[in-house]
Image: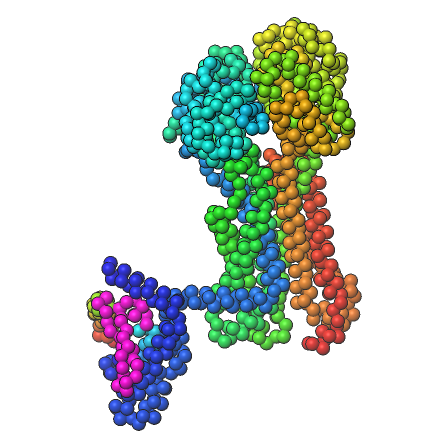
Amino acid sequence: MIAFFESVAARLRHFARNLLRRTRVERELSDELDGFVDLLVEEKVAQGQSRDAARRAARLEIGRVDQVKEHVRDVRVGRWLDALRQDVRFGVRALRRRPGFAAVAVLTLGVGMGATTAIFSLIDSVLLKPLPFHEPDRLTTVWEVRPRFNMPRLEAATLNFVDWQDQVQSFESLAAYVNAFVNLTGSGAPERLASSQVTPNLFPTLGVDPFIGRGFTAPEGSPGHTAVAILSHGLWQRRFGADRAIVGQTIRLDGEPHLVVGVMPRGFQFPREGIQVWTPVDIRAGWGVRSRASFFLNVVGRLKPGVSVAQANTELGVVSNRLAQAYKENADGSALAIPLQQDMVRNARTSFLLLLGAAVLVLLIACANVAGLLVTRGAERDREFAVRTALGGSRIQLLRQLLVEGLLLSAAGAVVGVLLATRTFHLLETLVPDSLRGAVGPTLDLRLLTVAFMAVVFTGLVFGLVPLRHALKMDLRTPLNARTTGHPSARRRAQAALVAAEVALAVVVLFSTGLMIRTILNLQAVDPGFRPENVLTANVALTPADYPTPAKQNAFYREVVERVGRLPGVVSAGFTTFLPYTTLIGAAPVAVEGRPDPGNGSNVANVRAVTPDFLRTLGVPLLSGRGYSDRDTGKAAVALVSERVTALFDGNPVGQRMGFGAIGPAAMTVVGVVGDIKGEGLEVPNTRGMIYLPAAQLDAIGFFSPRALAIRTASDPLGLAAAVKREIWAVNPDQTIADVRTLDSIVNGQISGRKVQTQLFTVFAGLALFMAALGVYGLLSFVVTSRESELGVRMAMGAQRRDLVSLIARDSVVWVACGLVGGFALAVAVSRSMSSVIYGVHSLDWMSLTASACVLGAAAGVAALVPVWRATRVDPIAVLRAE
Amino acid sequence: MEQLTQGAFLVNPGSLFPALHRLEQKGWLKAEWGASATNRKAKYYRLTAAGRRQLRAETANWGRISVAISRALRPVEEGA
C-alpha cells in the first residue's frame, strides 16, 4: 500500500516537473544523452579503439538523438496534456485560417446554446430549485373542490378550514391567509401597502423565523386583542431606516394603531412578491364570515414527516365525506392538497418545457448546420489529412485533432451562448409566476455553466464525429493524386441528410410558433364584455377610521367623481369594489323571491358595489331595464344583474325581488340587466354572473366598499394621471393612490406571459428558418463546387441552362421535401403536448402547418438562388482548360 | 547489458532511455548527476528502496513464469 502511494507521489512529482519546468527537463535530457555518448566513447577507447573511430561507433550506436528524445518524451507522465496543447494550438490555427467558417459556426452554435441555456436557467430557477422555506417538500396548499362550480379549485370556507385543522391528521399544521391592502399613515407620506392577513401559525408552518422580534402568538388576531403587525425587510429598511427599535413601536394601519412585533428576513416573500406587512387573524376565534359556502381562505399546510401528499389527499377525502354528510353546503364537496412548489408554478411547467423543447430543437438545427459545414470543409481537408497520414500521422491523431476542433468550436459557441443568455434574463423574468417573482429568477450560476458545458461536449461530439466517418474511410491515394476532391457523393449524401433533418426540425419549431401566434390573436380577439381602451384606473382605498360610515364614503366618491369629471378629456368616472382581473373573490349565493334555493351553489354570483356611472365608464352594456342614477340611495334597495344571473329568475328579472343568502330573498328589486364580463380570465369560461349594487345603499363599510376608480377618457388616459391625483388630494390630502394604470394594461396582463413566450417562440422560429436556409445554401454551394467540371463539360456538350438548373436543384428539392414530410410527422407527434397552452385553435391546426411548410419552402428557394445562378455561370472553357 | 546477457539482449538507446525514465517516474530509480571518466557530466541511476522491492517481486514472478513455461514446454521438446 505504501509502495503504491510512493509510486503515485513520484508520478505526481514528475507530472508537475514535466509540465512546469519543460526547458529544464529538456536540457537535462540533452545532457544525459551527451553524457551517455561520452561514456560510450570512453568505453570503446578503453577497448583499444582510436578516439575518432570510437566516437563514430558511439554515434552509430545511439542512432538519431532526436528520435531517442522523442521516445523519452512519449513515456513522460502528462504526455497527453502536451498532445492536447498541441492539438488545441493546431485547431485554433486551422480555424483562424478560415475565419468566415469559424464565425458562422461559432455564431450558429452560440445562438443555439444561448437559447437552450437561457430557457434552462428559467426552468432551473422556477421548477428545479427548492423553495426558500424549511423542508419545502413537506409544504402543500389545500383547496376546496366543488365539481358543480366548474372551477378546478376554490379557496376554503372558514368553518371547513377549522374542521380540517381539527380532523385531518396528516398535517403537522394548517395555516391560512387572505391578501389585502392597508393604508400606512403617520410617519411620512400616506402609503398603500400590499398586506397579508395570516393565521398566527403561518410562519411556523413555513418554517421561517422573523429576522428580528418574534412571530405571532395564538391569541393575537382574535377580536379585542391588541392589534399587532410584522413588517417585511424591505418596508423596514425603506420606511423605518432599518431601525431595530421599531419592534415594540406602534404604527397606524388603516388608521388603527398596530404594535410591530417583528421584521421578516430579507428575501422572504409569501404568499407573493411585494407583500410588505403581515397582520394576524384568528379564524378559530371568529374572524371572517362564519360560513361553509363563502370561499376566500388560501390554505397552506405542513405534512407530518413521512406523510405523502397522496396519503394526505386520501384523508382529506375521508374528512370531506364526513362534512358532506353533515352539512348541506358541503354536498358533493371534497378537498385537494397540492405540493406547494407545483401549485406556485401552475401552468408554467408545461409552457417552460415547451420553450426548452423549441430551444433544444434550435440547438440541434445549429449542430446539424455546423456538422454540414464541417462535412464540406472535410472535403477540402482531405488533402491535408492525406499528407499528414502519408508523413506518419496516425489515424488516432487525426481523430483527436477533429474532435478537438469540434470541441473548440462548441466551446467558443458556448461563450457566445452564455453571454447571449444573460442578456435575456430580464425578459425571462416576466415568465416567472407571480408567486415566485422576485424570490427566484434566472441567474448565471454554476448549474447553468454546468449545463452549458454539457451542451459543449454534446454538440462538439455530435458534429465533431460526423466528419470522422469520412476521415476513417479515406483512401490516401485519391486526394493525393487527383486535382479535385475525388468522389464527393458520399459527403453530399451526408450533408443532404443533415439538411433534411434541419428542415424537419424547423417545421416543428415554425408550426409550434404558428400555434402560439394564433393563440395570442385569439386571446386578443376575445370580447371581455367591456371596452378596456382609454380607461385610467387607480386604487383609492379609504382609511376606515377617516370614513367610518357609508354616507361619509359616498360623499368622498361623489366629490371625486364630480371633480374628475370636470377635467378636460374625461368622459365619465366611477368607483367599484374590484376591477376585472384584479380580485376574484367576493361572491355570495343569490336568493330569488318565489324560487327555492337550488342548494348546489349554482346560484353563487360575484357581488360588486358601484357608483352610478361606473358601468358606463367600463363600457358594460345595459341589456334591459335601467341603470343606476344618483337617486338610488334610500331604503328602496335596487340591484343590477348580469345576463348569466337571469337564469335564476323566472322570466325577465327586471322588477323581481332578490337578496343574498341569509339576508333573505326580498331585500332588493332588480332594475336592470347588464352584459356579462369575462372577469375570471380571458381564456376561462365564466363560472359566475355579476350582481352590481349601488354603493350608496351599502349598509356598512367593509369588504364590498368601493376602492377602485375607473375614468374613461377621450384620449391617452395616462396623460390625465397627474391631474386626477391632484383632484383626489384636493378632496383628501392624506388619501393613498396606488396602482395608477390603464385598464388596457390590466387586460393585457392576462396575456403578457403568453406574449413573451410567443416572442421567444418567434425568435426561435426565425433562427430555425435562417439556419435551415443556410443549410440549403451550403448544400447547393457544395454541390455546384464539387460538380463544377461536370457542369462545364455538360455545357460544352450543349446542355441548356435549364438542364443544369434542374440537375442541381432536383436533389435538393427531393431532400427538402423529405424534410418537410418528416417535419409534418414530428409536428403531429408533438402537437398534443401543445394543447394545454393554446387557446381557440386546434393542436393540429392545418393553417399553421401549411404556413410553416410554405415559409420553409420559400426560404429554401431563396437560399438556392445564388448557388443555382452560379451553376449557370460556369465557364466551360475555363473548366476544360483546367482538366 | 549486452555483456551480461552474452549478446542475447541488445538494448538500443531508443528503448533504454524511455525505460529508464519510466522507472524513474514510478519512483523505482533515482537519478544522480556524476562525472564521467573525462570529467564530463553524466547521469547515473540507482535503485530506490521501492525499486528494490519491485525488483524482488518481479524477479520472483519471473522465476515462477519461467519455471512454468519450461515445464509446459518440456513435453513438447521431448515429444519432438
The relative height of residue A596 versus residue A80 in the rendered view (above or below) is above
Q: Position of residue A653 (x, y in %)?
A: 71, 11
User: At x 56% / y 37%, what residue is drawn?
Assistant: A432
Q: Is residue B26 magenta?
A: yes
Q: Nearer the viewer, residue A839 or A247?
A: A247
- Place residue A800 in its image quadrant: bottom right
Q: How many marks?
A: 0
| Residue A459 appears anywhere in the view | no
Give the vertical position of A231 relative to A868 (above or below). Answer: above
Q: Is residue A231 left or right of residue B58?
A: right
Residue at 59% x, 14% y: name it: A548
Give the left or right position of residue A145, taking residue A571 as reference.
left
Where residue A645 sits, quadrant-wise, is top right
- Image location (x, y in percent) of residue A20: 39, 67
Highlighted range, magenta: B21-50
Residue at left offset 58%, top offset 43%: A426
Q: Give the colour scheme shown.
A: rainbow
Q: Is residue A409 visible?
A: yes
Position of the C terminus of chain B by quadrant: bottom left
Q: Which is more toward the observer, A685 or A624?
A: A624
Residue ID at (61%, 64%): A99
Eyeballing the image, is A802 above or below A537? below
Question: Toward the viewer: A208 or B64?
Answer: A208
- Expressed as whole percent of the image width and height from the top left, the position of residue A883 reads 68, 76
Magenta segment: does it hold A696? no
- Viewer-nearest residue: A205 or A635: A635
**Rendered view: A334 above or below B44:** above
Q: Quadrant of the N terminus of chain B?
A: bottom left
Image location (x, y in percent) of residue A615: 71, 20
